[in-house]
Every structure is written in structure tokens, then in C-alpha cells.
Amino acid sequence: MQLRISVNDGVPIYQQIVNQVKYLVAAQRLEPGEALPSVRKLAEQLVVNPNTIARAYRELETAGVIVTRRGAGVYVSEGGSPLARGEQTRILNERIDVLLAEARQMNVDLDTLIELIHKRSRRLPATSSTGESS
């Protein structure tokens, strides 16, 4: 799990961790049941206080994104949290907004844009719900 922390962007470090883990789960880069690094290991990797990691993990657990198994570690929730699905929708909506704004700037109407999306979609390999090619 690769996370990037910025001390200059004004967002608390624990929140950056929460946001990035939510994104990784929503993007299916972290699979249900996948183990996350221990608090100590992630704190060492990111060079932050272990309490910061513990706080991020608590928030993620409260949101249903991860589960802690006593003595076994921290794992991505098996059921796929509703938060992760909501995060997928949020991410896609942001990208759709950018695409629509660019299309408007180029005077491309919605029907043409949808036709272009259909054409591009047919060119992409089919993927299963786990992100693997079929």
C-alpha cells in the first residue's frame, strides 16, 4: 500500500491517510480481506507518529472501510463498505464534471460526447467486478 503524505497542503495527516485508503478501496486497489500494514509499520514507512496512524485506522473502522482482528491485524472490510461505493460515485462524478466542462468548452454536445464514450468503451478490454481482465 503506497500512501503519499504532504505536510504542506493544510489537510491533517490522519485525514490524508483516511482519504487515500478510502480511494484505494473504492478503486479496488485494496481488495476485501486484504491486510493493511500494522500501525507501527505504517508509521515507520510514512515517518509519522503511530498515534496518527491509529487515529486514521479508527476513523476507517468506524466508517466500515476496515476491520481490526485482535492479534491478527487490520484488514479491508469483506462486505465492501457502502462508503467505498459512495467514494467510487464521488470520484466518477468529479471526473464526469471535468469531462462535461471540457466538452462544453469545445462545443461538443452531450449526444456526441455519449457516442464517443460508447466507442471508447467498446475498445477497452472487458473487466470483471474485481478488476481482472476476462
Image (tube, rainbow, N blue to C red):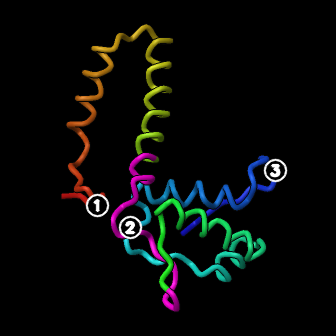
Q: Which numbered dot is residue 130?
A: 1
Which residue was labeled with disc 3? 8
Q: Could you classify mark 3 by the number of other residues whose Cα lies within 10 Å: few (under 14), some (14-19), or many (20 or more)?
A: few
Cα separation, mark 2 vs mark 3, equals 30 Å
Mark 1: which secondary structure? loop
**Image quadrant where one finds the C terminus:** bottom left
The residue shown at (54%, 61%) is 21
Is 80 rendered above or below residue 83?
A: below
Residue 57: where, in percent of width, then height?
A: 60, 69
Residue 120: where, in percent of width, then height?
A: 27, 33
The residue shown at (42%, 75%) is 34
- Please state which amino acid type lies under the numbered disc 2: Glu
- Mark 2 touches mark 1? (CB < 8 Å): yes
Q: Could you classify mark 1 by the number of other residues whose Cα lies within 10 Å: few (under 14), some (14-19), or many (20 or more)?
A: few
Residue 13: where, in percent of width, then height?
A: 73, 59
| Image label count | 3
Is 83 contained in the magenta span?
Answer: yes
Which residue was labeled with disc 2? 31
- Residue extending farthest left: 134
Q: Can you tell which quarter of the image residue 124 is in?
A: top left
- Mark 3 touches mark 1? (CB < 8 Å): no
The residue shown at (33%, 65%) is 79
Q: Earlier in the sequence, mark 2 or mark 1?
A: 2
Read off the magenta span: 70-86
